Amino acid sequence: MAKTDPVKITVLRKLKIDDLFDKYAAEGFESECPIFRVGQEFIARQDYVPEGFCRWAWADIFRDVICLSGGGNYPHIRQKGVMISGCTGGFRSVIFKLERIEE
């Protein structure tokens, strides 16, 4: 098995799109993601979901975590070993910073 590096996942921003929320959200549904808080950090090792991490968000960012973990970089990001990724939570998405931790 090829060597993989851990990836630090930091919650950068929780989006709240009020006009869409007001129009489409079910009664009693929270307007912001209740799972994450800005500044919260997780460490992903190999392809395992970090403890306490939302599995829906993991499904959205998994490919970026795997790319960074395996040594990949993104040409549209200034810093090597970094990616800005997000969960597709519709009107209450969460934006993450992913950073490879080279060991």
Image (spheres, rainbow, N blue to C red):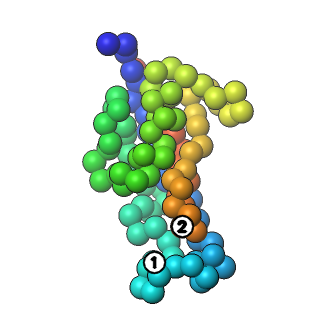
**Identity of the residue drawn at 42% across and 85% down:** 28
| x, y percent for residue 103 | 40, 20
Residue under label 1:
30
Secondary structure beneath label 1: loop
Residue under label 2:
92
> Residue 10, relative to residue 33: is it above or below?
above
| x, y percent for residue 3 | 37, 15
Mark 1 and mark 2 in contact? Answer it, CB < 8 Å. yes
**Identity of the residue drawn at 42% across and 46% down:** 59
Name the amino acid, label 1: Glu
> Residue 93, relative to residue 22: is it above or below?
above
Classify mark 1: residues with Cα within 10 Å, few (<14), some (14-19) or many (20+): few
Classify mark 2: residues with Cα within 10 Å, few (<14), some (14-19) or many (20+): some
Secondary structure beneath label 2: helix
Q: CA distance from mark 1 to mark 2?
A: 9 Å
**Identity of the residue drawn at 28% across and 48% down:** 51
Pick the quarter of the image with the N terminus.
top left
**Identity of the residue drawn at 57% across and 79% down:** 24
Left-right relation of 48 to 73 = left
Q: Which comes sooner in the sequence, label 1 or label 2?
A: 1
> Residue 9, relative to residue 53: is it above or below?
above
Specify the label residue 64 is tagged with.
none
Q: Quadrant of residue 66?
A: top left
Name the amino acid, label 2: Arg
For this orientation, the residue located farthest to the top is: 1
